Amino acid sequence: MDIGQVKLHFNVHGEGEPVVLITGLGGDLTFWKGLVPLLSPEFKVVCFDPRGAGLTESPDSDFSMSDLADDVAGMMDGLGIEKAHIVGWSMGGNVAQDLAARHSDRVGCLTLISTYTRRPARSSYAIDTMIRMVREGARYESLFMMMQAFCMTEASFKAREKRLPGPKEPLTFAADSIDGFARQKKALDGFDGSAMLERITMPTLILHGTDDIMVPPQYSEELSQGIKGSRLENIEGAGHIINPRLYHEKLQAFISANPLRNGKEQPYFSE
């Protein structure tokens, strides 16, 4: 889909009220492969590759978090979706905050998973080091393997050790350009949503793992305090990447309890 300077790669699954899923740093639409089948029987689920990742095509130039949010609004325009429920994970939660603050008429309810108003300094330092290592000759795959070390829990790695050797597991993230990844990271560095939280007035659900070391739980508490009327749900024992089966019932109930009232959705027909 062409939206201005960006040719966005996206998928649509199911029917019903639209739910847009926004993934995090370096992620593409495959990040949501566990959640989509759980939501699509009830909702129209839209997921996409943000600029800088996956199959989306965009100019070889820097961009901001607001640009990423405008890409979401442009995609919704292209799909004939006036208003949608927005779900953002990690950096995708920053995109979702910007969208909710500047395009509030496009957002029904908002769900922020494993996210923050300002990226943690320690995690930023680690990711910058990973980027530098790739530029100095390390395999790009190694960056995402290290990202997993920060995003998954100790329990998940202990379970991995006990499994019998077999085919190599697919990476959680899929991206093919260190330059695109670095541009996303630069947009992340330039974002601080603290001042915009008071402009987020739609129903908001915040989900966060208690064992998240990439983004410690205190960051979700700051979000909850800054967004009036929001509800914070801690997922016990979960890390930065949370298995959808641990939260999809909470998410479905939240969306169903906040149906779209003013959005006039037009039918979407694939080419």
Image: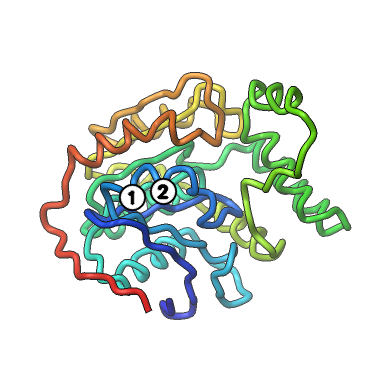
Evaluate if marks 2 and 1 touch, with contact meaning CB atoms under 8 Å apart.
yes
Establish if 105 lies above or below 268: above
The label number, if any, that marks residue 36 in the structure image: 2
Establish if 198 lies above or below 49: above
Instruction: Please state which amino acid type lies under the numbered disc 2.
Output: Val
Kind of element beneath mark 1: loop
Quadrant, the N terminus: bottom left
Q: Judge left or right: residue 151 versus residue 13.
A: right
Q: Judge left or right: residue 213 versus residue 104.
A: right
Q: Which residue is mark 1?
A: 40
Q: Locate residue 238, reporting x and y percent.
A: 52, 25
Q: Locate residue 114, reporting x and y percent.
A: 48, 36
* Residue at the spot 36% in from the left edge and 58% down from the top edge: 13
Toward the viewer: 132 or 108? 108
The label number, if any, that marks residue 97 in the structure image: none
Q: Residues within 10 Å of mark 2 (few under 14, many from 20)?
A: many
Q: How far is the residue under mark 2 from the one under mark 1?
A: 6 Å
* Residue at the spot 74% in from the left edge and 41% down from the top edge: 146
* Residue at the spot 58% in from the left edge and 51% down from the top edge: 25
Quadrant, the C terminus: bottom left
Q: Locate residue 171, reporting x and y percent.
A: 67, 47
Toward the viewer: 44 or 126? 44
Establish if 85 lies above or below 71: above
Q: Judge left or right: residue 145 versus residue 42.
A: right
Establish if 206 lies above or below 238: below
